[in-house]
Image (tube, helix red, strand yellow):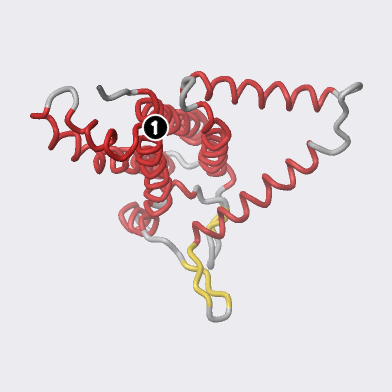
Amino acid sequence: MDIGERLVEELGVKNVTIGSFVISESIVNTWILMAIILVVCLLLTRNLSVDNPSKTQVAVESFVTWIQGMVRDMLGEHAAKYTDYICTVLVFIALSDLSAIFETETEFLTFFKPATKDLNVTAALALMTITLVIYTGITSKGVGGWMKSFTMPMAIVTPLNIIEVFTKPLSLCMRLFGNIFGGFVIMALIKMIMPIILPIPFSFYFDVFDGLIQAYVFVFLTCIYLSEAAEVEVE
């Protein structure tokens, strides 16, 4: 299979048929990832202690506190109530991107294929973000105040502010999908040139470093949008 055929195959989404149900490959891999996260969480939260915490408990609590603190700082005071949601999105995208390290292709399903390689998934994440941003704007300012905010800082920019409602989720969606899929394209080309040794350091960059960066960027922009929606006051 040449590179062109592989790219076309990657752009397509395989379906898994279970009886009369047809399930997307991305959904199956998301379920697998969720099951792994659930099992790990259950194992890490067993035998928790307040008086005599284990080293594992201290390490996990430190990590969770660090993630929550970082997200809370990005959200700001007025949008801090979304900290747990943003942390969940961050962990999901990061682990989904990292799962590319273990990607295994079979005849029926590509196991551990990052869900973020599916445009439908990144579009759903972006849609959830913009829905929450709109909800935050309305609850913070009221319907009238939220509608009036489109005229700020001057009425002439109203059309641009309205268009921005649609461009924000599109930007989030395409940025995440484009970077993850772009990394796959580069790795496919590298594997064609030297399939044994050369892909290792590049895989570390695209599957680990770049995957974590893209998760952070998505969450960072989401926090900015939520913070603006919650804090901006219309006079």
Most foreground residue, 108 or 156: 156
Most foreground residue, 214 or 167: 167
Residue under the image location 25 percent in, 22 percent down: 235
Residue 185 at least partly seen: no
Q: Quadrant of the N terminus?
A: bottom left
Residue under pointer 1: 140
Residue under the image location 40 percent in, 37 percent down: 139
Q: How many marks?
A: 1
As displayed, is residue 2 above or below residue 96? below
Question: Residue 219 appears at what percent x and percent y?
Answer: 45, 31
Residue under the image location 70 percent in, 47 percent down: 38
Tell whether 132 sits left or right of 21.
left
Question: Residue 169 appears at what percent x and percent y?
Answer: 32, 42
Residue 177 at least partly seen: yes
The residue furthest left is 156
Q: Which amino acid does label 1 sit on?
A: Ser
